Amino acid sequence: MGRWRAGAAGLVLSVWTALGCGSGASTEPPRPEEEDPGSPPQPPKPPMLEPGDARWTVHSRTLGQQDAVAVASDGLGGSVLLGSTRPTSTPDASSTDTSGTALTLTHHDGAGQVLWTRSFMPEPSEGGTAHAHAQFLAVSSEGELFVAGKLEGRLRLGETLITDSHFVAKLSSDGTPRWARATGTVKALTPDIEGEVVVAHGRLVTRYDTRGTARWSQEMPALASASAVALDSDGGAVLAGQRPLSPVESIGFIARLSPVGEVYWELEVGPAAPSFTQVIFAADGGLRLTGDFKGTLHWGGTVLKSTCAEEGCSRAAFVLAADAAGRPLWGHALASPTTGEPQGARLAADEDGGAAVLWRHGCGSELARLSPLGELSWQAPYVTQPCDESLRLRDVTFLSGGDLLGTGVFSGTRALGGEEPFTSDDADVFLQRLVP
């Protein structure tokens, strides 16, 4: 546009002079042509991320051996991480015995930055040990935290002293303990919007009010045979495990129980007996179950098979989907491309009915994403070569907005999906936010 204007003005001036309509030849020098500034330089476009790619990975280099146990969305785009810390002894340490394992809670924002950290170190009991084993984490819709674990030693949480017992505890949104209660072995816990929590422990299902007082407790002997349990906010339970058919043969089972232990429905899962490791409720009230099996599973109209060769069949991870009435929806068997049989499978369900599942094997871990129809969308390895256990993915959850968040532990130097490698102090925890 600047060049067009300068050229037009010169043309008009020439015509005016040629017609003798001026006072003589112009002594003004011609105007210089304006240079087109052009477009300013544009910054390079970031690479397009594909499903399964990491948006970011964060790592806090902390002294001692860190471990991750569970991660949960805080409902605001961030996350809460439950883990443990074992201090590393140093030559110049004081005479105070620092051996033991502390329970740790860390709150991260949506970019993975630490908002706060709480550490709870027990004292040795008469047996001389002081270990807090973290097991379960849940975050209520109001941001309150519920933690379950096992204690060897003595630990004060709120006004309660827990000694050599399994326990459940409630903490405020900033990690301050509110109350704690000694329990049997905890298998599941579910908070509600009122600040109460339902806990499956030992052979009991107990509902605790906002102050930790047991409102009711119901014995459910079937809990003893269940390897995976999920609770609804009313105290009803979904159990999954194995039932013996003979001294040498077992079959899998899934059962839905009322808050007073009545059986709503029950399914047998086989003919191979699967090992169930987790069952969760989907957003629509349906169920997602995971674990591992060897051989064949019949699930509705789907037949799941593990990988078999001449030397025999290996175990495979699986995900099963059912509606609230126990009717099978879909099933998927997952194979590990590396050596080692799957174990410790865990999963999370998204708002659309899809799922993410991780499992461990001899060389690390695998993470897979399944669609609402049970189709494999992508699979990502977290492995080390040569094969060892220095990298493990521990748990996954879906954040508000739909992204997938994984947490794990590593030692040594690892790239962890980014260009810049991370180096751990001993064994450190990492968080990774993924495109779903």
Image: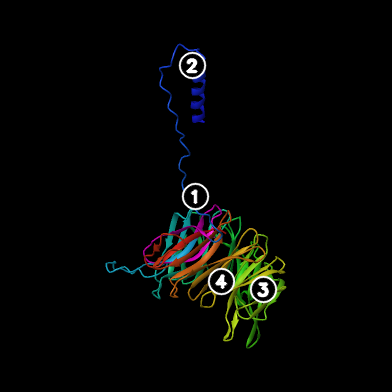
Camera-near label (2 vs 4) is 2
Q: Is residue 241 visible?
A: yes
Mostly what secondary structure, the magenta segment? strand
Q: Which mark is residue 345?
A: 4
Q: Which residue corresponds to mark 3? A: 254
Q: Nearer the N terminus, badge 1 or badge 3?
A: 1
Q: Which residue corresponds to mark 1? A: 45
Task: Give neighbour class at mark 3: few <14, some 14-19, many 20+ (Cα, 10 Å).
Answer: many
Q: Is residue 44 above or below residue 56?
A: above
Q: Nearer the N terminus, badge 2 or badge 4?
A: 2
Looking at the image, residue 411 sits to the left or right of residue 273; the answer is: left
The Cα–Cα distance between marks 4 and 1, rounded to whole angstroms, is: 38 Å
The Cα–Cα distance between marks 3 and 4, rounded to whole angstroms, is: 17 Å
Label 4: state its secondary structure: strand
Kindly indicate whether the residue at mark 4 contacts the one at mark 3 (C-beta within 8 angstroms). no
Camera-near label (3 vs 4) is 4
Kindly indicate whether the residue at mark 4 contacts the one at mark 2 (C-beta within 8 angstroms). no
Q: Is residue 303 above or below residue 44?
A: below
Q: The magenta stretch spans which residues?
A: 53-80
Q: Nearer the N terminus, badge 2 or badge 3?
A: 2
At x 67%, y 81%, the residue is: 271
Camera-near label (1 vs 3) is 1
Label 2: state its secondary structure: helix
Question: For residue 123, what is the image quadrant?
Answer: bottom left
Coordinates of residue 27 in the picture (x, y in percent): 40, 17
Q: Is 27 one of the magenta-colored residues?
A: no
Task: Give neighbour class at mark 1: few <14, some 14-19, many 20+ (Cα, 10 Å).
Answer: few
